[in-house]
Image (cartoon, rainbow, N blue to C red):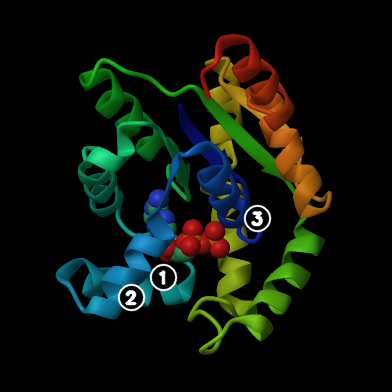
Amino acid sequence: MKLILLGPPGAGKGTQAKRLEEAHGLVQLSTGDMLRAAVAAGTEIGKIAEGIMARGELVPNDVVVGIISERIEQPDAAKGYILDGFPRNVAQAEALDEMLAGKGTTLDAVVELGVDDGILLKRIETRAAETVGGPRADDNAEALAKRLTVYHEQTAPLIAYYKAKGKLKTVDGMKDMDEVTRQIEAVLGISKKEGNWLSRLTGKK
Ligand code: ADP
């Protein structure tokens, strides 16, 4: 299964992606994590991305499209993946469609986590305070305001883009984490209960 988790910064995409990874054997592919790793390692990509990320702006499309097209070729991605933080604008979404069409495949679903801006600010303040080793360079009021603006201007249009393709599923990202997980599994038809019931019938997992 190939999925996108879509939602504003602090919506809980990373948390939910990790849960799906553990429960359903999908791989989480987070462009934010990959870029932070590149910054930490001081690679060429890291040098390009560092200042842009700290300001809450978007890294150039060709950089992230290049990272993702290499990453989905890795053997562990063959069984399915969850894209977290990619695509972030329509040009990236079109590049992804082309990439997948080139491999003779397509996305299964795009899950939108709906969350109000007011809640996001609080969540990110909490995350900044709780992060071991200090907050992320972009978890401060100024960068967050920029990330939210960028989300509304560039990423939110993807909701209509995927709706038009019949791929969009929306869940309430303001519920508690377990409930959000349950809703995601329900819209994808991969709830644990159903899995057990099916596996009892078919003998397969
Ligand atoms: P959040 O989900 O909190 O917005 P991420 O970890 O997904 O944070 O991304 C952090 C930063 O990394 C972004 O603000 C942006 O600078 C950069 N980034 C991540 N993914 C992309 C992408 N697909 N395109 C451009 N920039 C990206």
Q: Looking at the image, is 143 positioned above or below residue 117? A: below
Residue assigned mark 2: 50
* Residue neighbourhood size for the residue with mark 3, other residues' Cα within 10 Å, grouped as few (<14), some (14–19), many (≥20): many
Tell me which numbered mark, 3 or 2, is placed earlier along the sequence.
3
Q: Which mark is residue 145?
A: none
Task: Note whether residue 117 is visible.
Answer: yes
What is the three-letter code of the residue carrying label 1?
A: Met
Q: Is residue 198 left or right of residue 87?
A: right
Mark 1 and mark 2 residues within 8 Å of each other at the beta carbon: yes
Q: Mark 3 or 2, which is nearer the eye?
A: 3
Does mark 1 have its CB less than 8 Å from ligand 1?
yes
User: Which residue is tagged 3?
Assistant: 12
Element type at mark 2: helix
- Comparing labels 3 and 1, the label whose residue is closer to the camera: 3
Q: Considering only vertical position in the picture, is 199 above or below 3? A: above
Q: Position of residue 192 (x, y in %)?
A: 68, 31
Q: Quadrant of ligand 1?
A: bottom left
Q: CA distance from mark 1 to mark 2?
A: 5 Å
Q: Residue at x 65, y 61 (%)?
A: 10
Q: Amino acid at mark 2?
A: Glu
Quadrant for the N terminus in the image: top left
Whole-Å distance between the Cαs marked 3 and 2?
23 Å
Q: Which residue is mark 1?
A: 53
SS under mark 1: helix
